[in-house]
Structures are given as structure tokens and as C-alpha cells.
């Protein structure tokens, strides 16, 4: 019975991985779909809010999807069928693929606030996957790349995307300045992103992929505000500083953790 459940899990991840890729293609405008940047009245375009990353930032999805394809194939191998690590995170990985596709469909329907809920659920699932990965060490460099690397980038990027998603939903509701104005609230969100990045670095012992993806997204927010249709002389340097802080935090924690004078890590698989 357990072996049957393992096989069902493996097949489910493969099937959902294919559906996620098809959904991504549809969300990019293929198969008659509307590009995400144009859906929902352009609420999620690169110039919709001061914390929207420049369009080039979304190239990271190509790397993430490539990693997810590799992961789906790798976890389907007979050698991974009874893997303790995959039993712990496999269904969560499948859930992340479902939520990814659901987010694209919701945006296509123009439901911006619903997309925030879906994105929040995806973020929670990815954090749970992180905890499963940290609980059990990787068994090979292939697993480190396809599992830890892929889902680290996935989590880091979705963290930044969630912040941009919240800002887009708020802007679509036309709430007015709410005291601080668009620039002020953008600075608050960017500072929050930096704090989250530092927390990830400390909690994971400096996993680079999470903070690297966050720094990538934050840096492209800076680029979009320096050179684009929605320039903002305040948000741009704050976003650049946040990107630097997030990346530096991971590097510092990682170096300190590997220092001969540092105490050994107590969490298996933390890297």
C-alpha cells in the first residue's frame, strides 16, 4: 500500500509539473492566453506600482521552471520512490505546482485580490517545503541542485512576487494615499522584504538560492524605478539597498557558519 502511494505521488508530481508548464505558457500569451502583464487591466505590469519589478526580472521563471522539470523527472526515478525526504515534501511540491497554475488562471480572470490569496498559499507551501528540506540532508549534488536549488529560487522569487502582488491589488482598489502615499508604502514593503531576507538567511544558515532570488527581484525593482515609465527617485535606491542587504545577509551568515570558530549547525541538511 505504501509503495502504491509513493508511485501515485511520483506520477502526480510529473503530471502537475507538465500542467504547470502549460499554464505558464498560457500565462505568457501562448494558446490564446493574455500575457500576465496585460491581464487584470495591467494591474501586474512592470509599471503598475513602484514595487513592480522590471520585465527582465521575470526571466528567472525560465530557470525555476527548468529546475521544476528536472525535479519532476528526478523524483520519478525508482531510486526516489521510497525516499524519506520525498515522502515528506513530494505532495507539498505537487501542491505548489497546482497553486502556481491556479495563480495564473486567477490573474487571467482578472481577480487580483484572489490572486493575493493564492500567492499567499503558495508562499506558505514553499516555506513548508523549505522546512522539510532542512529536516533531512541532501544525499547527492544532483539532489542539492534539483531540490534545494530549485525550491530555494522558487521561494525567494515568490516572496518578492507576493509583495508586488499585494501592492498591485491595493493599487487596483484605488484606496488613495492612505497617509504615506505610493512611495511611502513602497519603502515600507521594501524594508519588510529586507527583514524577511535577513530572517531567511539566519534561519537557514545562509542558503544562497533563496536570498539570491530575492536580491534579483529587488534589484530589478530598482532598475524599473531608475529607468522606466514609473521612475521614483526614492524607491529606486531603497530597492537597491534592500537587494544588497538580502544578498549580503546570506553571505555573512554562510561564512560565519563555516568559520572554524563557529558552532556546528544543529539542523540536518541546512546549507
Image (tube, rainbow, N blue to C red):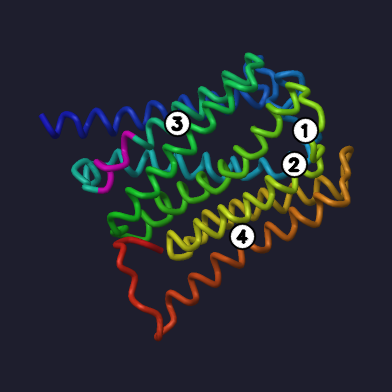
Q: Which residue is mark 1?
A: 178
- Kindly report which numbered mark, 4 or 3, lies closer to the viewer in this rendering: 4
Q: Majority secondary structure of the magenta segment?
A: helix
Which range is magenta? Answer: 85-91
Where is residue 206 shown, x and y percent of the image?
48, 64
Farthest left residue? 1
Q: In this view, which residue lies farthest toward the front?
A: 179
> Mark 1: few, some, or many residues within 10 Å (few <14, many ≥20)?
few
Quadrant of the rendered structure where residue 38 is?
Answer: top right
Between disc 3 and disc 2, whose residue precedes? 3
Q: Is residue 79 left or right of residue 36?
A: left
Earlier in the chain: of badge 4 and badge 3, it is: 3
Label 1, label 3: how many angstroms apart (C-alpha)?
35 Å
> What crowding class fits label 3: few (fewer than 14 Cα within 10 Å), some (14-19), or many (20 or more)?
many
- Location of mark 2 (residue): 185
Q: Position of residue 3 (x, y in %)?
A: 14, 34
Dot 3: element: helix
Tally the numbered discs. 4
Q: Earlier in the sequence, mark 4 or mark 2?
A: 2
How far, Cα to Cα, is label 3 from label 2? 31 Å
- In the picture of the structure, the residue carrying the numbered disc 4 is 246
Q: Are marks 4 and 3 in contact (CB under 8 Å)?
A: no
Q: Earlier in the sequence, mark 1 or mark 4?
A: 1
- How far apart, in angstroms, are the residues tagged by discs 4 and 3? 26 Å
Which of the two discs, 3 and 2, sits closer to the camera? 2
Between the C-alphas of marks 1 and 2, the distance is 9 Å
Q: Please tell me which of labels 1 and 2 falls first in the chain.
A: 1
Please state if 158 lies on the left or on the right of 145 as rendered.
Answer: right
Amino acid at each position: 500500500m505504501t509503495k502504491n502511494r509513493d508511485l501515485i505521488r511520483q506520477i502526480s508530481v510529473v503530471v502537475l509539473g507538465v500542467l504547470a508548464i502549460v499554464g505558464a505558457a498560457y500565462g505568457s500569451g501562448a494558446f490564446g492566453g493574455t500575457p500576465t502583464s496585460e491581464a487584470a487591466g495591467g494591474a501586474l505590469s512592470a509599471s503598475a506600482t513602484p514595487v513592480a519589478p522590471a520585465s527582465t526580472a521575470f526571466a528567472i521563471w525560465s530557470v525555476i521552471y527548468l529546475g521544476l522539470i528536472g525535479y519532476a523527472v528526478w523524483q520519478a526515478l525508482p531510486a526516489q520512490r521510497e525516499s524519506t525526504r520525498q515522502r515528506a515534501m513530494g505532495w507539498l511540491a505537487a501542491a505548489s505546482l497546482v497553486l502556481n497554475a491556479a495563480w495564473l488562471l486567477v490573474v487571467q480572470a482578472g481577480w487580483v485580490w484572489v490572486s493575493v490569496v493564492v500567492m499567499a498559499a503558495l508562499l506558505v507551501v514553499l516555506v513548508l517545503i523549505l522546512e522539510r528540506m532542512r529536516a533531512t540532508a541532501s544525499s547527492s549534488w544532483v539532489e542539492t541542485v534539483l531540490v534545494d536549488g530549485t525550491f530555494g529560487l522558487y521561494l525567494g522569487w515568490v516572496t518578492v512576487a507576493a509583495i508586488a502582488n499585494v501592492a498591485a491589488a491595493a493599487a487596483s482598489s484605488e484606496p488613495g494615499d492612505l497617509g504615506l502615499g505610493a512611495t511611502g508604502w513602497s519603502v515600507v514593503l521594501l524594508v519588510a522584504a529586507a527583514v524577511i531576507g535577513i530572517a531567511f538567511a539566519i534561519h537557514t544558515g545562509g542558503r544562497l538560492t533563496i536570498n539570491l532570488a530575492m536580491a534579483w527581484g529587488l534589484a530589478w525593482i530598482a532598475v524599473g524605478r531608475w529607468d522606466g515609465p514609473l521612475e521614483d527617485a526614492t524607491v529606486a535606491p531603497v530597492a537597491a539597498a534592500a537587494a544588497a542587504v538580502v544578498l549580503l545577509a546570506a553571505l555573512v551568515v554562510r561564512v560565519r557558519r563555516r568559520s572554524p570558530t563557529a558552532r556546528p549547525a544543529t539542523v540536518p541538511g541546512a546549507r
